[in-house]
Image: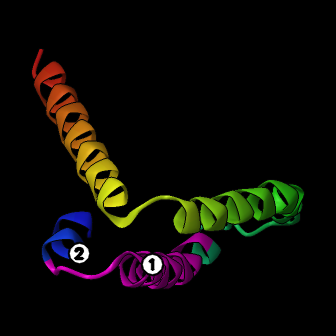
Amino acid sequence: MSVYLLRANLDKTQYVATAAVIFTAINYVKLIPYGLLGQLNSTNILLSLCFIPVAFIGVQLGAWLHYKLPTTLFFKYMYCFLFLTGIKLIWDGVSALN
């Protein structure tokens, strides 16, 4: 997703909003198999509800950073994180061969 969106030349707000919509859709689709596998039980739901304050703080911090970080620096960070993720995936793939 990041590779595609970074090449789409979106502005910072469009990039973040599109990523949020994509991940929301993916997470809603995952509810079906999780439900079929019996993972949507009261224990997991209560545990998820315990993380609401942490999620709220994360959203507030992300919004604050979004408006404070200059656009060029934002995209430099996105490319750096994408590069680091690629390196980690390559490492995992190579180390699994041994």
Q: Which residue is mark 1?
A: 26
Numbered marks: total: 2
User: Which of the image's four quarters has the C terminus?
Assistant: top left
**Residue at horizontal 37%, vertical 58%?**
74
Provide the secondary structure element on which disc 1 rests.
Answer: helix
Residue visible at 31% across and 45% down in the picture: 81
Which residue is label 2 attached to?
5
Question: Magenta stretch: dominant SS?
Answer: helix
The amino acid type of the residue labelled 1 equals: Ile
| Horizontal side, residue 13 vs residue 11: left or right | right
- Mark sitting earlier along the chain (2/1): 2
In the picture, residue 42 is in which quadrant?
bottom right
Q: Position of residue 37 (x, y in %)?
A: 59, 67
In this view, 72 is above or below 77: below
* Residue at x-position 16% and y-position 81%: 8
Residue 55 position, x and y percent, is 75, 60
Q: What separation in Å lies between label 2 and label 1 (alpha carbons)? A: 16 Å
Q: Hey, what amino acid is under mark 2?
A: Leu
**Neighbours of disc 2 within 10 Å: few (<14), some (14-19), many (20+):** some
Q: Which residues are magenta?
A: 8-34
Question: Residue at horizontal 87%, vertical 58%?
Answer: 53
